[in-house]
Amino acid sequence: MDDRMDRMEGPEVRFEAQPERGGEAAPSVGTAGGSRDSFTIGEVVERLKPEFPTLSVSKIRYLERRRLINLNRTRGGYRLFSPQDVELLKYILTLQDKEYLPLKVIKKRIEGGGPVTGMRKDSAGDLSSVLEDRVYTKEELADALDSDLRFVEELITVGVIGRSGTLTQRDLEIGRMALEMAKYSIQPRHLRGIMAAVDREASMFKQILNPELRSGDDQKVHEAVAKARHLAQVDSRLKELMMENAIDTFAPAQDRA
């Protein structure tokens, strides 16, 4: 129904000669003087796409169904965004895509008097305490990832996330990367090998630092953990460079010259 309504022509809209993405004609809304006080859903997507590359018409419809935004419509059925609606959408997308808050939390912030004209100057500090100790249920993590629950459960089953018994902000970021790999048909079960390699390297680091870790001296233990994190950074960069060398071999030798 939504797809049909967004294609219907209402008495308040006219069609431009240029087609919108996907071959659909885009309605143009404005005043007699030509100033714009309303935008169509397609125009909003194009306007915000540079800042939010994953934004789509279907994602906006989903946010509307979840009642995070409440849009006016023409008599012909088109969704219309006011400038304030656009700012509210930017606020929601920022919290979801850059601060990793689930939609339930975002909705509570909005209903509790959250800003509707963009992010507050102190929003980063305001969110830090929420994010620092954030713990998710499986359902909340799936919601934050905009994925189905089965995907999250598969990641837990193969030991990629939830290893501490809880689902944290770090697990959310791992889930986002796993979703990106899934676009290339690399499913959670395929990540077992990567997780096994991580476990082997972590065990090696622990063995190297074991005397300090078992010393009983809090300062030495703290320093050992810091050394382990540094080793992990070096290890990550080393593997990145090695992978680049390996990928270079994909192309024929004459193309690599």
Image (cartoon, rainbow, N blue to C red):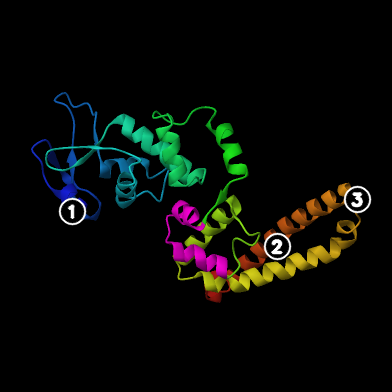
Instruction: Answer above or below: position of 12 versus 216.
Output: above
Residue 11, by quadrant, is top left
Q: Residue at x 84, y 66 (%)?
A: 207
Sequence order check, earlier mark of 3 and 2: 3
Q: Nearer the viewer, residue 254 or 145?
A: 145
Q: Residue at x 86, y 57 (%)?
A: 213
Question: What is the x, y in percent for residue 32?
Answer: 13, 25
Is 146 included in the stretch rendered in magenta?
A: yes
Do callouts 3 and 2 mark residues in contact (Cβ within 8 Å)?
A: no
Image: magenta residue range: 138-157
Cα distance between the residues tagged 1 and 2: 52 Å
Question: What is the x, y in percent for residue 64?
Answer: 31, 44
The amino acid marked with disc number 3 is Asp
Sequence order check, earlier mark of 3 and 1: 1
Residue 27, by quadrant, is top left
**Left or right: where does residue 81 sit relative to residue 99?**
left
Q: Residue at x 40, y 37 (%)?
A: 90
Q: Which residue is mark 2?
A: 238
Q: Which mark is residue 1?
A: 1
Q: Residue at x 68, y 71 (%)?
A: 197
